[in-house]
Amino acid sequence: MVIMGRIVAPYGIYGWLKIQPDTEMLDGLLDYPEWWLGRENQWQKYEVETARVHSDTLLVKLKGVSDRDAAFALKGKQVAVPRDQLPELDENEYYWSDLIGLQVSNLQEVDFGRIIDVFETGANDVLVVKGERERLIPFIGQVVLDVDLDARTMRVDWDAEF
């Protein structure tokens, strides 16, 4: 499963849900007619009945979720899709969810910690790396030298003082 967002709250009284997507495009989740809701290894499949963009969130009606109580029971759950449903990536492209948890070190072998988040700034994506302290590292070719998903490591050209 690849985490694509989370349920932040029920919306209205008819079972609608407010979703905070973690996709590049706000409506990217709407490309998938079925979503898996849950956490870790406990997932349940739901079919998307209807959905629309609302400000910076998605409003979604799932089949089988017909009232506010049922929607409230899903609050806080993650929204995921199976990895095999995602489009193939080009070389040197990565899903953000694959980067979370990678161990990051620089050319001088200084261990920066693990990637705990990735966010977009408009100019480029930024890695949030947490170790002895938190670092924000731009996810650009001049800085990120090697990503090894199998070894769960990333090597960067970044000064340990930044």
Image (cartoon, rainbow, N blue to C red):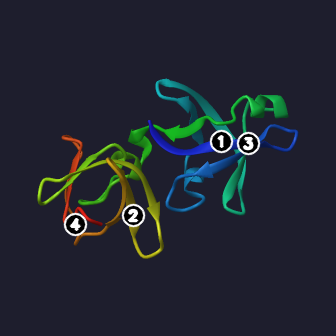
- Give the residue at mark 3: 9
Left or right: residue 64 compared with residue 91: right
User: Which mark identifies residue 19?
Assistant: none
Q: Earlier in the sequence, mark 2 or mark 4?
A: 2
Q: Earlier in the sequence, mark 2 or mark 1?
A: 1
- Give the residue at mark 2: 126
Residue type highlighted by circle 2:
Val
Q: Position of residue 11 (x, y in %)?
A: 80, 45
| Quadrant that contains the C terminus | bottom left
Q: Could you say whether the residue bearing mark 2 is in a helix, strand or loop?
A: strand
Q: How far, Cα to Cα, is label 1 from label 3?
A: 6 Å
Q: How far, Cα to Cα, is label 2 from label 1?
A: 24 Å
Residue type highlighted by circle 3:
Ala
Query: Residue 33, can we see it?
Result: yes
- Give the residue at mark 1: 7
Front one among 61 and 102: 102
Left or right: residue 115 compared with residue 103: right
Residue at position x 20%, y 40% from top?
150
Residue type highlighted by circle 4:
Asp
